[in-house]
Amino acid sequence: MTTLSPLTWNPGSWRRFEAKQQPTWPDPAELERVEKELSAVPPLVFAGEARALRERLAEVAAGKAFLLQAGDCAESFDGFAADAIRDKLRVVLQMAVVLTYSAGVPTVKVGRIAGQFAKPRSSPTETIDGTELPSFLGHMVNDIAFSPGDRIPDPNRLLQAYNQSASTLNLLRAFTKGGFADLRQVQAWNQEFVAASPAGQRYADLGNEIDRALKFMEAAGISSNHPEINEADFYTSHEALILQYEEALTRQDSLTGKWYDCSAHMVWVGERTRQLSGAHVEFFRGINNPIGCKIGPTATPDDVVGLCDALDPQREAGRLTLIVRLGADNVEAGLPPLLEAVRDSGHPVVWACDPMHGNTYTSKSGRKTRHLDSIMAEVSGFFAAHRAAGTWPGGIHVELTGDDVTECVGGTFEVADADLPTRYETMCDPRLNAGQSLDLAFRLAELLR
Ligand code: PEP
Ligand code: CO
């Protein structure tokens, strides 16, 4: 086994290690041509922005802020109308307002957006009615349609992913800096179908309070024309799975000479690719973005501390976010030993709870789903474990959409098992709809108070 050494890192040094979950590209020359093209395109984000997020995450690590990381399981090349992007942003802004206003904690908003196009899969193939084909690996790689041609990896999709990320990010910047995210719009973020739900009504009440507070400020002669009120900071993130794409967008910052993966502000390593001697960990250790690492139920305290040592050797707050996804049934027993080991190792990590990926099951109707009760139970267990260890439950990592989908069951505006086929639209894992997302935000606010 090659040993990791900081001296030998470069954006392509991951190629010396085994990379799991990679597509079998049929035409390596075509892939190489695309990589070359990508390495010449403008970066999607700037190093300075990634550093700004790192500073915000350092506040989270210090227990002074809360991380809200949310978006699609997999973005689509098809469902990419401006409305869909706006509605996703809306839900995140709503959740952040609930958290900040009800719990008094600043919220760092990070989307699983503008680059979340590649998926690791538990099985390399999928069988429907006796036909076996390669699995769908995300629109960055192949198509979800079930035919042999659609499932062949096509490197030109890397370019399309870049282009779609660029226009998504452009729209997000316009929405967050151009008035849409103004706190005085807090009521306008409540979509009609959400407003009808109990969580939507609760949100409308909270919006009224905020409106009154802002009017009071104005009447008292305090202008609400501040970027803190008129604008929102919103960062992008995705699982950096396809390393050729990430390498091509990794650039050296002219100011500091350090390397940044400029495909997103934050990137994370998935549960299936976090091997210490694997290509993904090698790539991640050399980029200076804030990074995440998923931690599933098989990770031992030694594994987790080993990952901290590899990915955060300088012990810098804001550098590493551990995104734990143990499952509601495992969190109570499984989390405390991890918290204690990392606490004792001195790595100032952000702990985020992903209550989605450990709680997926197949419903009676045959669809993959998650129950809001399990999601809430994992979140509660996460908070309880942190209280006991004296550590800060720093954030939440969830799959959601602004649309009125029926993919997860439960919620105060209940989605029942029989409702699942009505609007089951996800490209991959089941997402919370806007009402369920608000339910979760109110629960989180109670836990944070
Ligand atoms: C995901 O976040 O969509 C995902 C695949 O998660 P994990 O790596 O934790 O399974
Ligand atoms: Co997912």
Image (cartoon, rainbow, N blue to C red):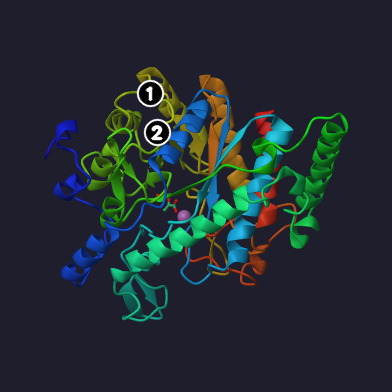
Q: Residue at x 42, y 73 (%)?
A: 144
Residue 229 occupies quadrant: top right
Name above or below for residue 142 compared with residue 237.
below
Is 399 displayed left or right of 137 in the figure?
A: right
The secondary element bearing badge 2 is classed as: strand
Question: What numbered label is drawn on residue 347?
Answer: 1
Name above or below for residue 219 compared with residue 357.
above
- If you read the primary sequence from the N terminus, does the residue marked by circle 1 or circle 2 appear first? 2
Q: Indicate if the residue with disc 2 has its beta carbon within 8 Å of ligand 1.
A: no
x and y, in percent, of residue 388 in the image:
55, 21
Three-letter code for the amino acid on which mark 1 is drawn: His
x and y, in percent, of residue 442 in the image:
71, 41
Is 148 displayed left or right of 324 in the figure?
A: left
Question: What numbered label is drawn on residue 320?
Answer: 2
Q: Nearer the viewer, residue 147 or 67?
A: 67
Q: Which image quadrant: the C terminus?
A: top right
Residue 100 occupies quadrant: top right
